[in-house]
Image (cartoon, rainbow, N blue to C red):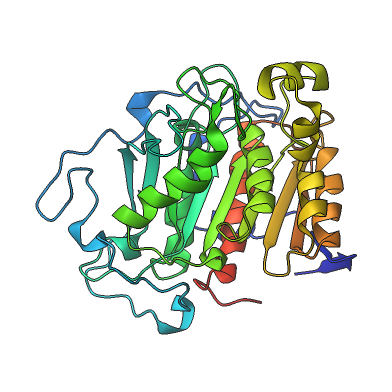
Amino acid sequence: MQQVRRSGVVTWVVVVLVVAAVSVALTLVAVRSSRPDGSAVAAPAPSASRTAPRSTPTAGTSPLGIPAAERPEADEPSSVDLATTWEPPADLPQQGRLLRVAVPGTTSHFVARDALLWLPPAALVADPPPLPVAVLMAGQSRGAGPDDLETAGHIAQTMDAIASLNRGLAPIVVVPDQLGPQSGNPMCIDGPLGNSSTYLEHDVPAWITSHLRVQTGAAAWMIGGFSQGGTCAIQLGAGDPARYGNIVDVSGELGPTLGNAARTIALGFSGDAAAYRAAQPLAMMARHGRYPATAAFFTAAALDHKYGPAMPVVAARAAAVGMHVTTWVLPGARHDWAMASDALAAGMAWLEPHVGLAASG
């Protein structure tokens, strides 16, 4: 695959990227409609009936439907090179399992709707290995929430395809509600609109490590999302590299916003302009210094003239402070879930070798 390297940024110049490999096993075409002229039909509105219901526990599962074998041990490893050590057992399922789980805001007191949890086939065997973690977030719009990652983003289908290419190995995916019950925009900060930052940096990881067999090091954890979720991803990845060592930012903005700076400062930062400026990812990166252990995947749609221009700016700054940056502009794409689904598939496939689940190169 041809690559161009400039200032520490790897720019993919082949349209197919890793999506081509993923699409071998995906059937996204069957579930993503298009008009006769090839333009995308709007993604369906989220529907609880199309996502995982709260599971009825069966033998060998917790009350949440999580296999009992997933119960974490006292001293899970920080990272494991499963690409070279994993031998798929005879009981390896062909597909993962999608669940809906409650992740309480114990420390943050943030009120969140249920999260989605996808467990790869390797997590469903009798003796599962500790796996990496991917925390993904939806964008912000009326009625938006975690279910969008499945109803419009087809995340379970995408992850099943990736796992099928890697002997059942894939990160455990958690899709928390960073928006709150009214699908508001607390902007992944702690403020008058809710302590979303503490929820994502403390409550969500604490729930994951207490319920699932996961690797504990930052190199095994990823934060990602689409649109507002992508903005949150670079905020949290830049602000907490000791937790999230990998970032997937799909069409994120330059920083947290409620439409304009004045409104954002007034409503989100209680009028504190200095706090607003400090919360911008570019400022966070400059303040932190070097990020030699962080890898980041940035994507934008070629026809997205509103959000797209932010990507090269943020990616260039990330590369300048030492992040290992990959960028991809999707030709002919717009800021919608058709683009986001492809970009997230590419980002998740990109992640596999970074977290030791597939051979690199």
Camera-side residue of 54 and 283: 283
Residue at the location (68% across, 39% down)?
231
- Is 181 rendered above or below residue 276? above
Question: Is residue 12 visible in this depiction of the protein?
Answer: no
Q: Position of residue 175 (x, y in %)?
A: 46, 41
In the rendered image, the quadrant that contains the N terminus is bottom right
- Is 272 rendered above or below residue 321? above
Q: Position of residue 281 (x, y in %)?
A: 76, 44
Q: Position of residue 336 (x, y in %)?
A: 66, 30
Residue at the location (50% across, 67% down)?
217
Residue at the location (82% across, 61% down)?
321
Q: Is 57 left, or right, of 226 in this rendering?
A: left
Camera-side residue of 139 and 110: 110
- Is 28 rendered above or below residue 354? above
Residue at the location (75% across, 20% down)?
271
Q: Position of residue 69 (x, y in %)?
A: 21, 63
In the rendered image, the quadrant that contains the C terminus is bottom right
Hey, which quadrant is residue 33 in on the image? top right
Residue furthest out toward the left: 59
